[in-house]
Image (tube, helix red, strand yellow):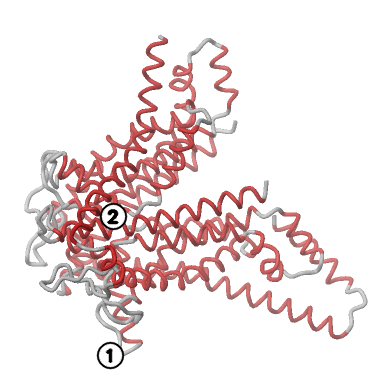
Amino acid sequence: MEETLEKPDKPVSQKKPKMTFESKGRTVYYQLQDKIFKYFALAATSLGLIVLVLLLYSVFSSGFDRLDWDFITSLPSKRAAKAGIYTAWTGTLWIMFLTTIIAFPIGVSAGIYLEEYSSRSRMSNLIEINIANLAGVPSIIYGLLGLEVFARFLNLGASVLTGSLTLALLILPIIIVSTREAIKTVPYTLREASFALGASKWQTIWNQVLPASVPGIITGVILAISRAIGETAPLIVIGALTYVPFAPTSPMDEFTVMPIQIFNWVSRPQKAFAENAAAAIIVLLSITFVMNAIAVYLRHRSQKKVKW
Amino acid sequence: MRKGEKFIEAFLFGCSALTLLTTVGIILVLSFETIGFFKDVSLIEFLTDTEWTPLFSNKHFGILPLLTGTFLVTAISMVVAVPLGLVIAVYLSEYAPGWFREIVKPVLEILAAIPTVVYGYFALVYVTPWLQELFPDQVGGFNALSPGIVMGIMILPLISSLSEDALYAVPKSLKEASFAMGATKLQTVKQVLIPAAFSGISVSIVLALSRAIGETMIVAIAAGQQPRLTVNPLVPIETATTYIVQVTMGDVPYDSLEYKTIFAVGMTLFIITLVLNNVSFWLKKRYTQAYR
């Protein structure tokens, strides 16, 4: 791209056909302006990166000393120095696990239906617009839905199950969209070859289309789950507690999660709790970054390996 | 065999129809409780009263202070994110060397993957004290400015990467025609690329706007819990989302009027974001038609 851009510039500036003094001055002025903008834009781009570094630095510098094995295995406490994140990360693990087993099959199935089965009917059009809309609904609204339907109406209370169902609904649009994108990359010839061998539609999907699109689907699911474990607002709204003295042992138990624990600590005025929050953020960010890195790696590898 | 196939298709359809059920569920839940709310409070009071004090003994139910709080923070975040995001998009698509772009784009997208509670921490523990040093004795411990700035950083990658896509989608021939006329890159960007990619860029801005309005944790942590009808960014305020968090953190009995208020506030949020999202779909549709 660069080369095609450079070329048209050169003949103009080399030839300099019959320029008056005034027009030459203007050209220099515009070129200078262009150069200034270039450095200004570089500075702006760097600013974005600098803020990221600053954010990470601020978290690590105040939280790193607080982070040790005791912090990870201790129960929450009113005394900042004794408090730990045991109940928080077990809660997060529970939520992660349950949300995945609820959202993964439903999301992938819906993605398959929309990409492979649905014709351009009014119904599938409606479903598509609807999914795009759901993706834009603020997460706190899902919390209100979960509070009313799962916690109250189905009487599940502020349990791990309620939290997982709520977050599953929240990430369904992400999983559906990425499943469709992954399936779209499988060329039609593959399906036709399978049909020609006498395979039925579902046999073709199950044996050909899905295996070919697995890396894309998994990437999407990991990103969706990583989004889910960072969510705070919907879980607070369904009534997840800020103080839980025990780790959940069943889906019906009350729970807290890492982001809620962080929120709780940040909201306290004492500096020691802010350090706890920073230490917990380091753990949460590590989980998020590892999941994102795996997703990026999978996407990268699948793009490299498969050339249709 | 046939029967099995039909059964599978029905199951898959059921899964995709579940998304419709989610929308129906959201609308039903919000409407049901909101109607209950409006049995006790008139719509006129809700829309025109300038005080929001449902948790006090002297109750007022005017949504305006919550909305101004939300829009104040949102406006600050847009002031940060729109110019910065656009300049970054222009730089990455037109000026930056390939290797720089390859590295910077994914790194900027990390900003979008960071949980919002972390931004809340950053706003309260770092940005607010820094602002207090900058403007001594003027900045409250909670204020709209600090979460606004931080939220601007959060939505930055949304604007920069969507706008970059839009700039990239402008046909090369337009750009080359401009260069052939002797225009510099900056002139081409200003007079050809941005006008041509305008609808794509506005899609990114509208989406970011909707994202900022619905954002909860940054404001819940750093903006305060004092609903106030003001445009002063230095004093504590409360946003619509924070109010919902504040009520659900406390012990409010089901079916009380206080409980219903969160659904009325939620309904308001839902309608605003729904409208914004559909504006962006409409813009996007127009924009894909223009360059096919």
Extreme-right residue of the structure = A18
On the image, the x and y values in percent for residue B246 come to 19, 64
Q: Which mark is residue B180?
A: none
Q: Are marks 2 and 1 in contact (CB under 8 Å)?
A: no
Kind of residue at disc 1: Asp
Q: Quadrant of residue A308?
A: top right
Q: Can you see residue A59?
A: no
Extreme-bottom residue of the structure = B137
| Residue name at image x 28 percent, y 90 percent | B137
Badge 1 element: loop
Q: Nearer the viewer, residue A201 or B231?
A: B231
Q: Quadrant of residue B277?
A: bottom left
Task: Name above or below for residue A304 compared with residue B142.
Answer: above
* CA distance separating discs 2 and 1: 34 Å
Q: Can you see residue A96?
A: yes
Q: Which of A5 and B165 is in front in this view?
A: B165
Left or right: A39 with respect to A231? right
Task: Name above or below for residue B236 compared with residue A210.
Answer: below
On the image, the x and y values in percent for residue A116 come to 49, 27
Left or right: B2 with respect to A226? right
Q: Quadrant of residue A113?
A: top left
Q: Mark 2 points at which residue?
A: A140
On the image, the x and y values in percent for residue A216 come to 46, 37
Badge 2 element: helix
Kind of residue at disc 2: Ile
Left or right: A185 with respect to A225? right
Q: Name the residue under label 1.
A: B137
Marks 2 & 1 on one chain? no
Task: Name above or below for residue A190 compared with residue B65.
Answer: above
| Residue name at image x 54 percent, y 73 percent | A43
